[in-house]
Image (cartoon, coloured by chain):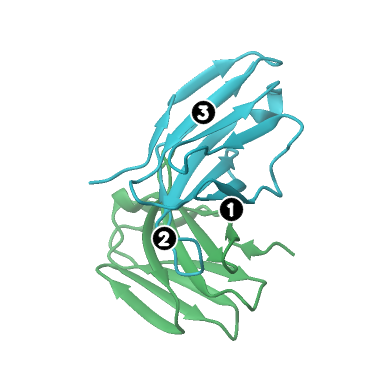
Amino acid sequence: EAEVAQSPRYKITEKSQAVAFWCDPISGHATLYWYRQILGQGPELLVQFQDESVVDDSQLPKDRFSAERLKGVDSTLKIQPAELGDSAMYLCASSLIAGDYNEQFFGPGTRLTVL
Amino acid sequence: QKEVEQNSGPLSVPEGAIASLNCTYSDRGSQSFFWYRQYSGKSPELIMFIYSNGDKEDGRFTAQLNKASQYVSLLIRDSQPSDSATYLCAVALGTYKYIFGTGTRLKVLA
């Protein structure tokens, strides 16, 4: 069964360091999402790609976060420098197409702890 | 007002009972609605989606949508301890906007 892959699964870093997360969506899925989920809250969309283009990054803290999907397949989310408040689960999801009737499939997530 | 609202719970039900989870949304233009289950420390997994007013059944799960009241619910029949999880409601607000609620924690007591 096709799955969304993410790595690493866990990351511990010190504040002011740089971290990067990787996501490989389900093959053929044009739309890729990065979410941040703080404990006890729902996922919050950080950035959405349609193929290699960003279509929504309104909630991405652009002073420290960046995301890319250069070839329209896998994607990297980077934080530099990391802050204590960035500790959360970072989830990647993909869907076949964007639009109202799309179903998103989530990867296992990366649990980030900033010390 | 939050765009998607859920009672955080916990909602406790005895094994075998019906669990009823509710979600309200603010944007009348919302077209599609999703229920995800999330076990502690895991990622969300899709349970059901619904687009049209009325009920949609899948096994022990029934999703109910009332667009006039801006309300969507999930019923779980014959609840099992393995159903204990957080249930997230998500609403698609057009092509490029997908909003999650904060989730309702369900506890099924054996």
The span from disc 1 to disc 3 (Cα, nearest Å) is 24 Å
The span from disc 2 to disc 3 (Cα, nearest Å) is 23 Å
Q: Nearer the viewer, residue A66 or A34?
A: A66
The kind of residue on which mark 3 rests is Phe
Q: Residues within 10 Å of mark 3 (few under 14, many from 20)?
A: many
Secondary element under disc 2, as helix, strand or loop, is loop
The kind of residue on which mark 2 rests is Glu
Give the label, 2 or 1, closer to the camera.
2
Q: Residues within 10 Å of mark 1 (few under 14, many from 20)?
A: many
Q: Residue at x 64, y 26 (%)?
A: A79
Query: In the rendered image, which quarter is residue B96 located in?
Result: bottom right
The span from disc 2 to disc 1 (Cα, nearest Å) is 19 Å
Q: Residue at x 67, y 64 (%)?
A: B3
Look at the picture and state if B2 lies above or below A42.
below
Q: Position of residue B9 (x, y in %)?
A: 54, 54
Which colour denotes chain B? green
Name the residue tied to disc 3: A21
Query: What is the chain letter for disc 3?
Result: A
Quadrant, the C terminus of chain A:
top right
Name the residue tied to disc 1: B102
User: Reading the chain from its start, which is encountered first: label 2 or label 3?
Assistant: 3
Does the rendering let one see residue B41? Answer: no
| Left or right: A58 as drawn, with respect to B50 | right
Q: Position of residue B23 (x, y in %)?
A: 55, 67
Name the residue tied to disc 2: A103
